[in-house]
């Protein structure tokens, strides 16, 4: 007589919710949204940037100077006066010359204010100053 072999196939019935495929799908969805999202830098202040069609993106941002339409000046979200601008910039840079200094000025500021700010920055020996603009939107 041939002996019978009993295989234990586990309990029959509903296997329940399998977590591994669910986690895999959630991971893939997260990767999809991260890769397809576009991240844009929004200014910390309500500034209407001037538009330019020939601008190029800044590769690295060390320091930012904001010039608001009401004449107020900010260095990395800290309000400064024109007289204290040099001292605050030196403190923010830690005594080093930053690779790039971004000036984000409202389109309604006067040319004189921009030149005064740039003149004080260049007096520090900082030459790599970039003016931030908004890309021209094609309407059509």
Image (spheres, rainbow, N blue to C red):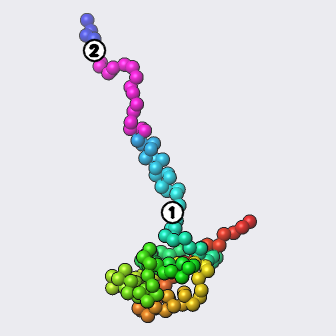
Per the image, label 1 sits on a secondary structure element best described as loop
Q: Majority secondary structure of the magenta segment?
A: loop
Q: Which residue is mark 1?
A: 39
Q: Is residue 70 left or right of residue 124?
A: right
Name the residue carrying label 2: 5
> Does 108 appear above or below 9?
below
Q: Are marks 2 and 1 in contact (CB under 8 Å)?
A: no
* Residue 105 shows in this picture: no
User: Percent x, y for residue 127?
Assistant: 46, 89
Q: As drawn, is 132 to the left or to the right of 81?
A: right
Q: Which residues are magenta?
A: 5-22
**In front of the other: label 2 or label 1?**
1
Q: CA distance from mark 2 to mark 1?
A: 62 Å
Q: Is residue 128 magenta?
A: no
Q: Between residues 46 and 9, which one lies in front from this camera angle?
A: 46
State whether residue 83 is above or below residue 20: below
As rendered, which of 9 and 27 lies closer to the eye?
Answer: 27
């Amino acid at each position: 007589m041939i002996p019978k072999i009993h295989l234990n196939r586990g309990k029959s019935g509903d296997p329940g919710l399998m977590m591994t495929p669910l986690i895999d799908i959630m991971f893939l969805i997260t990767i999809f949204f991260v890769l397809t999202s576009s991240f844009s830098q929004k200014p910390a202040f309500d500034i209407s940037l001037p538009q330019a069609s020939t601008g190029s993106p800044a590769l690295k941002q060390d320091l930012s100077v904001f010039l608001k339409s009401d004449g107020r000046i900010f260095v990395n979200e800290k309000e400064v006066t024109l007289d204290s601008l040099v001292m605050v910039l030196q403190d923010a840079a830690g005594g080093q010359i930053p690779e790039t200094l971004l000036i984000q000025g409202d389109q309604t500021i006067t040319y004189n204010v921009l030149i005064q700010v740039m003149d004080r920055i260049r007096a520090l020996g900082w030459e790599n100053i970039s003016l931030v603009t908004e890309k021209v939107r094609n309407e059509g």
